[in-house]
Image (tube, rainbow, N blue to C red):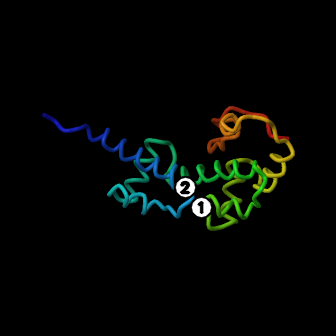
Amino acid sequence: MPGPDPRLRELALLRRVRDRIDREYARPLDVEALARGVHVSAGHLSRAFKAAYGESPYSYLMTRRIERAMALLRRGDLSVTEVCFAVGCASLGTFSTRFSELVGMSPGRYRRLATEHATDLPTCVAKQALRPVRNREAAPQRAPLA
């Protein structure tokens, strides 16, 4: 009787890594720590994760952090610096750069526009409509906030 398919085992392992990132995005995480958690090398994890999900574990982590930061900035009660640290980023510069890459504007501008144009959209709709998109060329075009 043959054992489980190794590809299915690897996909389950990658799903555990992705779930850990989703759950612990605000904690200090790096590829080495994620790899140790599933007993593989960092290089193997990076290659397999990118093959399965289309982006590296670090990129996925930063996308989750920026997605959460967008929600916090829309609330309007935290400064950009407070949001930066709340989502697990240690550097305001790195946070701002990555936020601008993914969202198309600085966190401060996003916060101003989001609070000026606050709507009564349910959170689940706003989250989907305003989700950061890594590959802008492949993304459907949507209207900017302002």
Residue 101: x and y in percent read 69, 51
Quarter of the image for residue 8 reads top left
10 Å crowding of disc 2: few (<14), some (14-19), many (20+): many
Q: How far apart, in angstroms, are the residues tagged by discs 1 and 2? A: 7 Å
Residue 117: x and y in percent read 85, 42
Q: Residue furthest bottom?
A: 91
Q: Residue at x 82, y 53 (%)?
A: 109
10 Å crowding of disc 1: few (<14), some (14-19), many (20+): some
Q: Residue furthest top?
A: 140
Q: Mark 1 touching mark 2, by CB under 8 A? A: yes
Residue ID for mark 1: 88
Quarter of the image for residue 26 reads bottom right
Residue 82: x and y in percent read 71, 63
**Amino acid type, residue under disc 2 in the picture:** Tyr
Q: Residue at x 70, y 52 (%)?
A: 72
Q: Please name whichever residue, 105 or 137, is drawn nearer the observer in this view of the structure.
A: 105
Residue 64: x and y in percent read 58, 49
Q: Residue at x 46, y 47 (%)?
A: 19
Please report whichever mark, 1 or 2, sits nearer to the chain's N-terminal start.
2
Q: Residue furthest left?
A: 1
Say which element carries label 1. Answer: loop
**Amino acid type, residue under disc 1 in the picture:** Gly
> Image check: 77 left or right of 29?
right
Residue ID for mark 2: 25
